[in-house]
Amino acid sequence: MALINCPECGKEISSSAAACPNCGYPIQDFLSNTQAANVIDTGSIISVENSMETVFLGKKYSFPLEIKQYLEIVRWYEPYYAQMLDLMYKQIKKKEYSGGADEDFAYFKNPLSKIVDAVIGKLSEYGVYNITSADLLDNNAGYRELRKVCTAAIEEEKRLLLEQISSFMDSMDEAEYSAKSHITGSGVSIWTSSLASALWYNFLETGVINQQEKEARKIYSGILEDASRRGASKQEQGHARMLVEQYYPGVKKALDMFSEELFGKIIRSLESAGKLDYSKISGYDINRSSDILNNLSNVNDKKPLLQQAYALCPYNMKVFSESINIGLFDKDMIDAAKEFDIDSEVKNQIASYCNAHKKEIVSSPEKIAAYAYIIDKDSIEVKKELFKSEIAGFKNKFDAYSQVASDRKRLVDWICQNMTDSSQKLYSMQDSEIKQKVDAFSNTSISDYTVKTLISDGTLTLVDVLPGAVLDYDGCLQSLSDSITNAVIAYKATLPDKLEKIESTYTSKKNEIERKLSQAKDVHSKILSNISDMEKELANAGMFELKKKKELKIAIDETRNKMEGATSDVNKLEAELKAIENEKNAADRITI
């Protein structure tokens, strides 16, 4: 006896229980169908012949080898289903007017016959020889439906008024065949056997064709809309409406029916010949496995839910993707994916995650080991590979700033960019303040936390990053910082002569202009005062003092002319003062 997780509620129960005591799920039916069981802390595995063992998120599982055989058939059948879809999409692009039911049907007949021939050949590889073309083609309900669609299209081709083009979308949605409808019970099954309709949905979800068909349907909708607008005459409009509302949806339905029944007959033929025991894999439900994943956002501990989804369908790529997206993966997961031929996609997703979360995974041995397994390198090489840009960036920065102390131009540029571009401000700084600023720059702009961590954990040595280094990481940074500090202080010591020259050159000029400007402003102020006094006197003059008023007006006009000249003098001197200040600032700028 072993403890397993109930496929329904996820609770741990005895593998010998008839039903789950928590939810009533039929445990023995599940075990007999899947021939697989989860293992808990004891590490024991229910012994199953012809099984494969995997480990997913730390738990061991055993699955029947028939799954591999089934997936091999799925992978082989995918291209043929894609060909069927492509037949219709190509016809939509080129079809204008029908050449008749026989001609339309012949367009599909030959390609479908070739697909059937390929199926017969494939079945022979499994030792199945009692299947004929009539079994797979002529007796296929979808094939017969396709002929009916072509015939009905000719019979229905008549003059119609195209009233509302948008209505074709509703008609297409109602007519379009959906494999999933068999799962929900809204569709009508076209073939019956011990093989459930879920088999076809399982095929669609398992294969990459799922995404291809979704994209194709978008193209299909666009092409149909274009077709519905082609006509100009009522006859052409009627023909377009027939294509949009009847012919193309009917063809899509018939091809889906054909493909589903053909795939089902492949499986049933292998079952009948004893080449595939579908009962061993019928319990694996990719639909339910995917539905369970919808609860991920509702639970705190996501690991048990992912394990349950995996147990329900170990080849469901969505389970692997969701696990990787939240950072739950290891080397065992890659091996588990390999058993079902989906390891290539799993590796790509893990590699993408690792590159996007480098700083997170560097402290996770399990994630590092998984990435190392992917790129076939050891853990140390993996870290170097992941952080090669950071390592190269640190080396380049260190090398570049190492030249600041010895190259005057680089030093001047660095001072201007990171401290000040004013000689006067730099000269006024204390040496301790300069050191503080340089050290802060070194810690924030040169030092790299990731590189320091890699050196600390032994992934790198400083010599790997800085060949010839004799100090440790912090020692090298401090030595570089000290050399830049000393270079800045030495440069500051050269500034007194420069500052004295600036002062002697521009101070006297500035003082002279400021003196003249002060005088000009005094003149301007007196003129304004005179004008104000004369305007008051003019306002107080008597009604009959005409001569006086005339003289005052003339004097006011003359004074205003003088004020314009005084204003011009002030503006000119202010401009000269600003120019002198700009010249002084330019001279004060730190240079080589």
Image (spheres, helix red, strand yellow):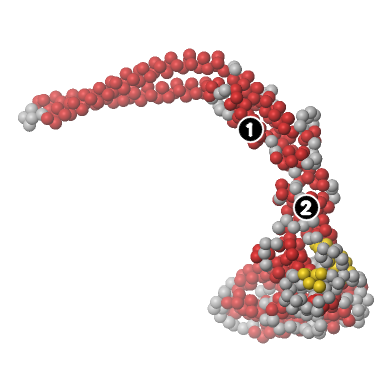
Q: Residue 578: percent from the left, percent from the top?
A: 43, 24
Residue found at x 52% / y 17%: 499
Q: Is residue 414 above or below residue 349?
A: above
- Badge 2 element: helix
Numbered tag placed on residue 367 in the rendering: 2
Badge 2 density bin: few <14, some 14–19, many ≥20, Cα 10 Å? many
Q: Nearer the viewer, residue 420 or 23?
A: 23
Residue linked to disc 1: 441
In which quadrant of the rendered view does residue 189 lie? bottom right
Residue found at x 67% / y 62%: 300
Residue found at x 57% / y 23%: 430
On the question of residue 308 being in view, the answer is yes
Q: Is residue 165 above or below residue 512?
A: below
In which quadrant of the rendered view does residue 241 lie? bottom right
Q: Residue 368: percent from the left, percent from the top?
A: 79, 50
Q: Nearer the viewer, residue 418 or 139?
A: 418
- Badge 1 element: helix
Q: CA distance from mark 1 to mark 2?
A: 34 Å
Indicate the amino acid at tag 2.
Answer: Lys
| In the image, farthest residue toward the left | 544
**C-beta proximity under 8 Å, tags 1 and 2:** no
Indicate the amino acid at tag 1.
Answer: Phe
State the quadrant of the N terminus. Answer: bottom right
Q: Residue 153: percent from the left, percent from the top?
A: 67, 82
State the quadrant of the C terminus. Answer: top right
Badge 1 density bin: few <14, some 14–19, many ≥20, Cα 10 Å? some
Q: Residue 181: percent from the left, percent from the top?
A: 69, 78
Q: Nearer the viewer, residue 167 or 448?
A: 448
